[in-house]
Image (spheres, rainbow, N blue to C red):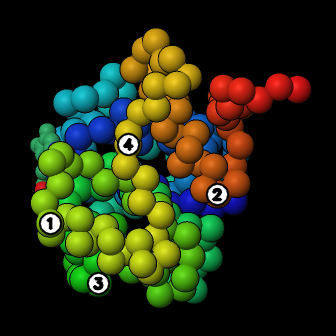
Amino acid sequence: MKIIVAITGATGAPLAIKVIKQLKELNVTVHLIVSKWGKTTIQHECDMSYQTLCDMVDVVHSVNDQSASIASGSFKTDGMIIVPCSMKTLAAIRCGFADNLISRAADVILKERRKLIIVPRETPLSTIHLDNLFYLSKLGVTIIPPNPAFYHHPQTIDDILTDIAVRILAQFDLNHPSAKSWQGLHDHQ
Ligand SMILES: Cc1cc2nc3c(=O)[nH]c(=O)nc-3n(C[C@H](O)[C@H](O)[C@H](O)COP(=O)(O)O)c2cc1C
């Protein structure tokens, strides 16, 4: 499989790193794009440098390179994950305003009707944000807010990141070994 991962300048860069780690553990080819403000949040929020993250993936694209392979629909991929997705990038995608490689690659995914996963991060959400999310959802985009579940009793931040990342990968039918599924309170074998 070949998946594009984009990191934008919303808080939550550690989640992006967790998603990339899990994709690589499953031998998925990862194309990475990080926005200018995504690089800032990586530096501010993560133990890992941008360069180390680049070393983990297969192809790194500059956010300014509109000539990249993934800027064209003729280059086949299995889809794209934008994690975390800022409200600015969300708005650009909703409008088809492809002014950088992240919004262009997402535009290509939409026009080719491939899988687009958006992990939006903002709180509270304005009516504009909600309207943009609703519109993209109607186009078939999967919206996964990075909300933790507590029924698996996470003990650490890493547990929470793992659980959210697993759910993102599951959208591609990728089953990471750390996946836990809810078994029901009253199910009996
Ligand atoms: C530390 C930090 C945290 C931010 N968190 C958010 C956020 O959670 N959501 C958001 O929409 N924007 C957030 N922003 C603002 C975006 O970085 C800003 O809107 C930027 O223009 C987004 O551009 P990009 O989508 O190209 O990365 C944050 C900025 C900084 C510096």
Query: What amino acid type is highlighted by mark number 1?
Result: Thr
Q: Are marks 1 and 4 in contact (CB under 8 Å)?
A: no
* Residue 30 in view: yes
Q: Is residue 105 left or right of residue 179?
A: left
Asked if the residue at label 4 sits under 8 Å from ligand 1, the reply is: no
Q: Position of residue 61 (x, y in %)?
A: 40, 61
Task: Report which residue position mark 3 lands on.
Answer: 96
Which label was assigned to residue 146?
A: 4
Label 2 neighbourhood size at 10 Å, few (<14), some (14-19), many (20+)?
some
**Which mark is first along the chain, 4 or 1?**
1
The image quarter containing residue 50 is top left
Q: Position of residue 164 (x, y in %)?
A: 48, 38
Measure the alpha-carbon separation of dots 1 and 3. Answer: 19 Å
Measure the alpha-carbon separation of dots 1 and 4. Answer: 19 Å
* Residue 103 in view: no
Q: Quadrant of the C terminus?
A: top right
Task: For mark 1, give the secondary structure.
Answer: helix
Label 4 neighbourhood size at 10 Å, few (<14), some (14-19), many (20+)?
many
The image quarter containing residue 129 is bottom left
Task: Report which residue position mark 1 lands on.
Answer: 127
Q: Is residue 46 left or right of residue 170?
A: left
**Which mark is first along the chain, 3 or 4?**
3
Query: What amino acid type is highlighted by mark number 4?
Result: Pro
Task: Report which residue position mark 2 lands on.
Answer: 172
Label 3 neighbourhood size at 10 Å, few (<14), some (14-19), many (20+)?
some
Name the foreground residue: 165 vs 32: 165
Q: Is residue 103 left or right of residue 161?
A: left
Measure the alpha-carbon separation of dots 2 and 4. Answer: 17 Å
